[in-house]
């Protein structure tokens, strides 16, 4: 009942956000909702798939959805109810649905759109960091102060070296990434000059979330990533919590609730740490992973707090 109620609520919310028609780019009435298969596109137990049709699910904007998953995902793990192509194994169906969701999101981003995405901390909004018009759209969407920087999101540590000047050991990067941490480093000349032009630094995220990593890998350049909320409002843990933003988005990827929606600690976002000064670190935002991050920096690598 909980799964069906959630799917129905999403469908009704999507209908409420619907505009005059579909479109690839950002704009009123163009958001479309994709219900994401769980588990990285693989069923926990393929033999337990029932092939029952999904209840609810939907998308905002007219026409056909970019991905016909029809997924009413499970709240607490395990197989949920979904629409399956007849004669197709459930695990193959789910993997295909996952790939199609990644492809739909990547296509929307390449067209200059804004896409709402689940991460390992809170829901975010992403665009192509090298697309100056899309970056401006994110600031407009959030009502964000133009002097407040955006982080970039990558799929793998290896790609970080192209967009940042790194002055810490590679092992340190891999101890913290992927994970709920944003590392602030000196930016390289490869990064779009219109992204945070007021600073020589940039925050880098590699979320420990399979969809985000697959999406980042599917894009030729870095993503600009920020939380899916109006600036100064609380972070969001479900897609319904930011449905007022849907009409200005190209695509909304629903990965289900992130963490305990009743817990304020789950809305803290990533821990932001400045590593741009050799041998030192500075905590910009405590976030949700402060203690383990500081332990790694101090005890394993001997870095000192910048105030020392």
Image (cartoon, grey):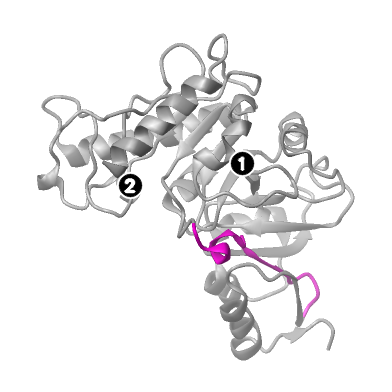
Across and down, in percent, residue 15 comes to 47, 20
Q: Would residue 60 be found to the left or right of residue 137 on screen?
A: left
Q: Is residue 164 magenta?
A: no
Across and down, in percent, residue 132 comes to 77, 33
Q: Is residue 252 visible?
A: yes
Q: Is residue 276 magenta?
A: yes
Residue at the disc numbered 1: 125
Q: Which of the numbered marks, if any, corresponds to residue 21? A: none
Label total for image: 2
Across and down, in percent, residue 293 comes to 60, 77
On screen, residue 232 above or below 104 = below
Q: Is residue 218 visible?
A: no
Q: CA–CA distance between discs 2 and 1?
A: 20 Å
Q: Quadrant of the C terminus?
A: bottom right
Residue at the disc numbered 2: 38
On screen, residue 233 above or below 247 = below
Q: Quadrant of the N terminus?
A: top left
Quarter of the view holding residue 88:
top left
SS for tag 1? strand
Which stretch is magenta? 262-278
Quarter of the view holding residue 76:
bottom left
Q: Which badge, 2 or 1, comes first in the chain's sequence?
A: 2
């Amino acid at each position: 009942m909980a799964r069906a109620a959630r799917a129905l609520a999403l469908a009704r919310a999507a209908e409420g956000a619907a505009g005059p028609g579909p479109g690839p780019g950002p704009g009123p009435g163009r958001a479309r909702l994709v219900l994401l298969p769980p588990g990285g596109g693989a069923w926990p137990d393929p033999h337990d798939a029932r092939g029952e049709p999904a209840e609810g699910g939907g998308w905002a904007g007219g026409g056909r959805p970019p991905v016909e998953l029809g997924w009413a995902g499970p709240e607490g793990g395990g197989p949920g109810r979904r629409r399956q192509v007849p004669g197709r194994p459930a695990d193959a169906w789910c993997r295909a649905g996952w790939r199609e969701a990644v492809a739909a999101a990547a296509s929307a981003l390449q067209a200059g759109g804004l896409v709402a995405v689940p991460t390992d901390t809170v829901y975010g909004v992403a665009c192509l960091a090298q697309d100056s018009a899309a970056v401006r759209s994110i600031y407009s969407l959030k009502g964000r102060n133009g002097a407040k920087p955006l982080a970039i999101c990558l799929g793998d540590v290896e790609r970080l070296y192209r967009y940042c000047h790194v002055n810490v050991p590679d092992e340190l990067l891999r101890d913290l990434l992927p994970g709920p941490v944003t590392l602030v480093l000196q930016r390289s000349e490869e990064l779009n000059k219109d992204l945070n032009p007021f600073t020589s630094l940039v925050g880098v995220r590699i979320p420990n979330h399979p969809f985000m990593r697959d999406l980042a890998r599917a894009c030729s350049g870095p993503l600009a990533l920020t939380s899916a909320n109006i600036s100064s409002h609380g972070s969001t843990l479900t897609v319904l919590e930011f449905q007022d933003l849907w009409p200005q988005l190209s695509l909304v990827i629903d990965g289900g609730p992130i963490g305990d929606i009743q817990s304020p600690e789950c809305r803290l976002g990533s821990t932001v740490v400045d590593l741009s000064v050799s041998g030192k670190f500075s905590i910009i935002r405590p976030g949700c992973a402060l203690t383990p991050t500081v332990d790694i920096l101090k005890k394993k690598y001997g870095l000192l707090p910048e105030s020392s």
